[in-house]
């Protein structure tokens, strides 16, 4: 067993929900005849999703969704799975990245699975002739959903896509606990710096930002939140975090983490206020949240250590992690979200893919929610794997909850 296979096997033992789905897929082959095109982070947990889809009878073609998040040994191991072909490689150029996207689409998939929407974007720009063959797709992450909703609002999304990111089982666990733990782990292992006692500036108080703030606070950090949404800013304040503008935070923060999905959240307007030794990192999908272009043009560059690029302004050093890319996966030792969290997210992907295969032709083009029954099924499977039980509503309680005329 090579290193990629060992990684996949290690993750598999901690993915009981996906294993249950694998067993059902292997027995019934519900995806027989389908070709699935995927652009996801190619690492061990993703490989187990791929393995599950292939067990269901599908042919699977996969590439990466970030040039620095692929684990090459896992990519090699994927090619050894029957009916699976992987095109991803770590450190590929932008042109090579899109060549791999095109290689997936050359397989003529009828279902897509995206993390960031790059496959769907390609289909709607340079590969429009293939759209007629697409039943539908699934999207994994917040950034991809934002892009898809923008397309749908303009009437330009031409097939149905399940918003896996937006269902409770994804947001409450993957976004909150997965991002919260994995991002801080990546920062600590890359820099070997202490979190306790430091001012941690988190841009954005969505589900990912909330999880990061709580985990950092639990490690002893003093957490500052920057926001553009007044309701989220107020929520952060009520939870005990400092709230201020990025310009105010720039002079105080020791470690900065962006989680917004937007561009230039940390920019030239902020760099000049930052302290010597400031650490900059991004937990959003694309490397646009920190203005790295401005840094490259206006500061001297030093490679401090693997995964850390330092930009020098006179006697001040600003340290950028993972080139401003997704820090929990793009750092040299970045492992992504914890296995148990991705067990839930990839269970949603597997069942969402099956739903598209069975019902995609009935759905209108646009962004669709994960069916409630799928979200609940994944939650129940997880509870069962933990040996936990919950109460059930009685017939009387169901009647009461469905009534309007009982009163007090």
Image (cartoon, rainbow, N blue to C red):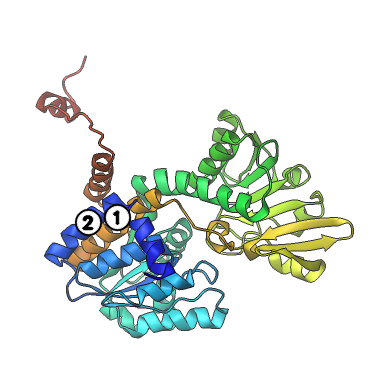
Picture layout, residue 158 above or below residue 46: below
Task: Say which residue label 1 marks.
Answer: 347
Q: Residue at x 42, y 83 (%)?
A: 102
Picture layout, residue 62 above or below residue 191: below
Asked whether residue 363 appears in the rendered view, the answer is no
Quadrant including the N terminus: bottom left
Q: Which mark is residue 6?
A: none
Q: Along the line of sight, which residue is nearer the eye, 135 or 374?
A: 374
Task: Say which residue label 2 marks.
Answer: 21
Picture layout, residue 5 above or below residue 231: below
Mark 2 in CB contact with mark 1 (< 8 angstroms) = yes
* Residue most extreme to the top: 408
Q: Along the line of sight, which residue is nearer the eye, 396 or 103?
A: 103
- Provide the secondary structure element on which disc 1 rests: helix
Q: Position of residue 6 (x, y in %)?
A: 39, 64
**Image quadrant in which you'd find residue 130:** bottom left
Gap between marks 2 and 1 measured at Cα:
7 Å
Q: Residue at x 36, y 66 (%)?
A: 47
10 Å neighbourhood of mark 1: few (<14), some, or many (≥20)? many
Mark 2 or mark 1: whose residue is earlier in sequence: 2
Picture layout, residue 122 above or below residue 169: below
Q: Name the side, left or right, on which 244 lies relative to 276.
A: left
Q: Position of residue 364 (x, y in %)?
A: 26, 65
């Amino acid at each position: 067993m090579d290193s990629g296979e060992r990684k996949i096997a290690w993750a598999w033992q901690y993915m009981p929900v996906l294993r249950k789905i694998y067993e059902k897929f292997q027995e019934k082959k519900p995806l027989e005849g389908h070709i699935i095109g995927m652009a996801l982070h190619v690492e061990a947990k993703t490989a187990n999703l791929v393995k599950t889809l292939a067990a269901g009878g599908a042919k699977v073609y996969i590439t990466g969704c970030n040039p620095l998040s692929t684990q090459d040994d896992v990519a090699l191991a994927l090619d050894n799975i029957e009916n699976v072909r992987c095109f991803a490689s770590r450190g590929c150029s932008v042109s090579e990245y899109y060549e791999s996207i095109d290689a997936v689409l050359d397989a003529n998939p009828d279902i897509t699975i995206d993390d960031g929407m790059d496959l769907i974007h390609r289909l709607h720009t340079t590969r429009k002739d293939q759209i007629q063959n697409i039943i539908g797709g699934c999207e994994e992450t917040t950034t991809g959903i934002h892009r898809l909703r923008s397309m749908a609002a303009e009437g330009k999304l031409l097939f149905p896509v399940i918003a896996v990111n937006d269902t409770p089982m994804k947001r409450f666990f993957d976004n909150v606990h997965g991002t919260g733990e994995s991002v801080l782990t990546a920062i600590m292992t890359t820099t070997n710096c202490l979190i306790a006692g430091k001012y941690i500036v988190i841009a954005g108080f969505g589900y990912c930002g909330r999880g990061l703030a709580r985990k950092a606070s639990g490690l002893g950090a003093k957490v500052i939140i920057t926001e553009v949404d007044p309701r989220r800013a107020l929520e952060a304040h009520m939870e005990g975090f400092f709230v201020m503008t990025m310009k105010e935070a720039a002079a105080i923060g020791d470690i900065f983490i962006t989680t917004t999905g937007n561009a230039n959240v940390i920019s030239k307007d902020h760099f000049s206020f930052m302290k010597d030794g400031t650490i900059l990192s991004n937990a959003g999908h694309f490397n646009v949240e920190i203005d790295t272009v401005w840094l490259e043009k206006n500061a001297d560059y030093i490679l401090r250590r693997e995964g850390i690029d330092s930009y020098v302004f006179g006697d001040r050093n600003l340290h950028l992690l993972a080139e401003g890319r997704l820090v929990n996966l793009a750092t040299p030792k970045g492992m992504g979200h914890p296995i148990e969290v991705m067990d839930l997210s990839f269970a949603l992907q597997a069942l969402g893919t099956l739903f598209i295969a069975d019902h995609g032709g009935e759905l209108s083009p646009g962004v669709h929610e994960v069916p409630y029954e799928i979200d609940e099924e994944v939650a129940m499977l997880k509870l069962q794997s933990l040996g936990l039980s919950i109460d059930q509503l009685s017939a009387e309680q169901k009647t009461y909850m469905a009534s309007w005329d009982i009163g007090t």
